[in-house]
Amino acid sequence: MELGKIVEDFLPPPEELICKKTIIKITLELNEEKISFLKEKAAQKHISCQEIIESLIDQYISDQVYANDDINIVRN
């Protein structure tokens, strides 16, 4: 009883299926208190401080896009 035929793999490799985003490196200056807070949160979640910062920026931008608001600048 034949269930079907075997076909040659026609899909591209996984790395070609994912849209790669261009990464731009930036320099960010934060005061020691803020860095300590971010490092503590990162350690609690077992991730890097950079991942925490990226996540915060991503969330902020998503909220701004969803709210369709102008970005409010707050300087301390």
Image (cartoon, rainbow, N blue to C red):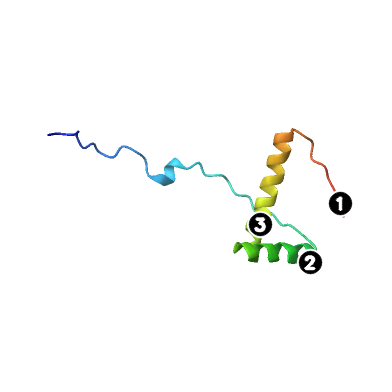
**Residue 6, quarter of the rendered image:** top left
Q: Can you tell which mark lies on residue 32?
A: 2
Discs 3/1, front? 3
User: Do the CB atoms of the residues marked 3 and 1 lie less than 8 Å apart?
Assistant: no
Query: What is the secondary structure assignment of the residue under circle 1?
Result: loop
Task: From the viewer's side, name the closer residue of 1 and 48.
Answer: 1
Horizontal relation, residue 26 to residue 74: left or right:
left
Residue kind at label 1, given as amino acid type: Arg
**Residue 39, quarter of the rendered image:** bottom right
Residue kind at label 2, given as amino acid type: Glu
Horizontal relation, residue 51 to residue 17: left or right:
right
Residue 42 place in picture, x, y as percent? 65, 62
Q: Residue at x 64, y 65 (%)?
A: 44
Q: Can you tell which mark lies on residue 52?
A: 3
Residue 75 place in picture, x, y as percent? 86, 51
Circle 2 crowding by C-alpha within 10 Å: few under 14, some 14–19, many from 20: few
Residue 46 place in picture, x, y as percent? 59, 64
Give the distance between the C-alpha atoms of the residues marked 2 and 3, in whole angstroms: 16 Å
Horizontal relation, residue 69 to residue 2: left or right:
right
Label located before the other in sequence (2 or 3): 2
Discs 2/3, front? 3
Q: Which residue is mark 1?
A: 75
Circle 3 crowding by C-alpha within 10 Å: few under 14, some 14–19, many from 20: some
Q: Residue at x 73, y 38 (%)?
A: 64
Residue kind at label 3, given as amino acid type: Ile
Query: What is the secondary structure assignment of the residue under circle 3?
Result: helix
Q: Quadrant of the N terminus?
A: top left
Label located before the other in sequence (1 or 2): 2
